[in-house]
Image: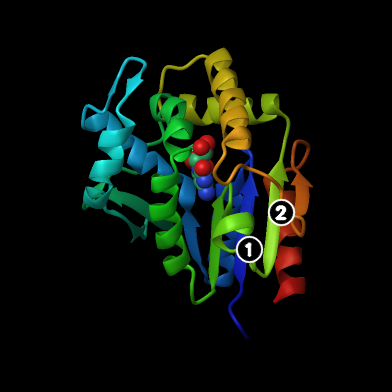
Amino acid sequence: MSKITIAIDGFSSTGKSTVAKQLAKYLGYVYVDTGAMYRAVSFYAMENGLISGEDFNIEALIYQLPKIEISFKFNKSEGFAEVYLNGINIEKRIRTLEVSGFVSKVAAISEVRQKLVEQQQEMGKNGGVVMDGRDIGTVVFPKADLKIFMTASAETRAKRRYDELINRGDQVKYVDVLKNVQERDYLDSNREDSPLVKAEDAIEINNSNMTLDEQFDKVLNLAKITL
Ligand code: C5P
């Protein structure tokens, strides 16, 4: 059976990565979390003093891009690939509200996108991949065999992200998480380079009122029809 390419795009915290991981595991495919790559570049900028207060030294980040090496390594006990920045596992450190508050600015820089999109295309060139992000079905793999576009209300998404952060021990307020989700929706949808839009041939799934099992069944059925 041929190995297809599955693109899952959508707004922040729509549960894309949860369903993408489940699907990749079920099909024996590789899962690629492209959001983690933009978060890794943001983390690099924060760690290397390229941001202070409202000032963000974009030129310096562009200049240093060749020094940023992002890779993934499968973690058997977690059951998915974790992200590494220049050989160091940063999987947990990129999921903070601080990184979330900054990442959409980094993701709007064309030079950053060009570098990461090239790497994503290389990772998925042989098919057998489930990739989630914002521009997978429109820019990275416009010819993907199956394109899914996930949506849910901002409040539902913020509640999910809030629960996730609280469960891992982060001290956050729901209003701040909601504000971040709404800001990222706006920035991601309105940037000039590769804005978040539903590809014409993508199938939209609004999972506001779906359980995780219902969501997985729906996506798996779509994959089975496509295979
Ligand atoms: O998916 P996640 O919420 O981790 O993505 C973090 C941010 O990375 C998004 O809000 C968006 O700004 C950026 N992103 C992007 N293109 C992608 C994946 C993520 O611009 N393909």
Structural crowding at the residue carrying mark 1, measured as other residues with C-alpha within 10 Å and reported as few (<14), some (14–19) or many (≥20): some
* Res 131 visible: yes
Which residue corresponds to mark 1?
A: 142
Give the structural element (helix, strand or loop) at label 1.
Answer: loop
Q: Is 160 in front, or is 105?
A: 105
Give the amino acid type for the residue marked by disc 1 in the picture: Pro
- Lateral position of residue 143 relative to residue 121, left or right: right
196, above or below 53, in the image: below
As drawn, 84 above or below 154 = below
Instruction: Give the image location of residue 134, x and y in percent.
Output: 58, 46
Q: Is residue 167 left or right of residue 20?
A: left
If you read the primary sequence from the N terminus, does the residue marked by circle 2 or circle 1 appear first? 1
Q: Residue at x 58, y 51 (%)?
A: 135
Using the rendered view, name the quadrant where residue 46 is placed. top left
Extreme residue in the bottom direction: 1
Q: Position of residue 205 (x, y in %)?
A: 76, 48
Residue at the location (58% across, 78% down)? 3
Calculate the distance from the C-alpha at mark 2 to the C-alpha at mark 1.
8 Å
Residue 215 vs residue 159: left or right?
Answer: right
- Image marks 2 and 1: residues in contact by CB distance under 8 Å: yes
Q: Which mark is residue 178?
A: none
User: Which corner quadrant holds the C terminus?
Assistant: bottom right
Secondary structure type for disc 2: loop
- Residue hosting label 2: 199
Name the residue type under label 2. Answer: Ala
Q: Do we see residue 92 in this rendering?
A: no
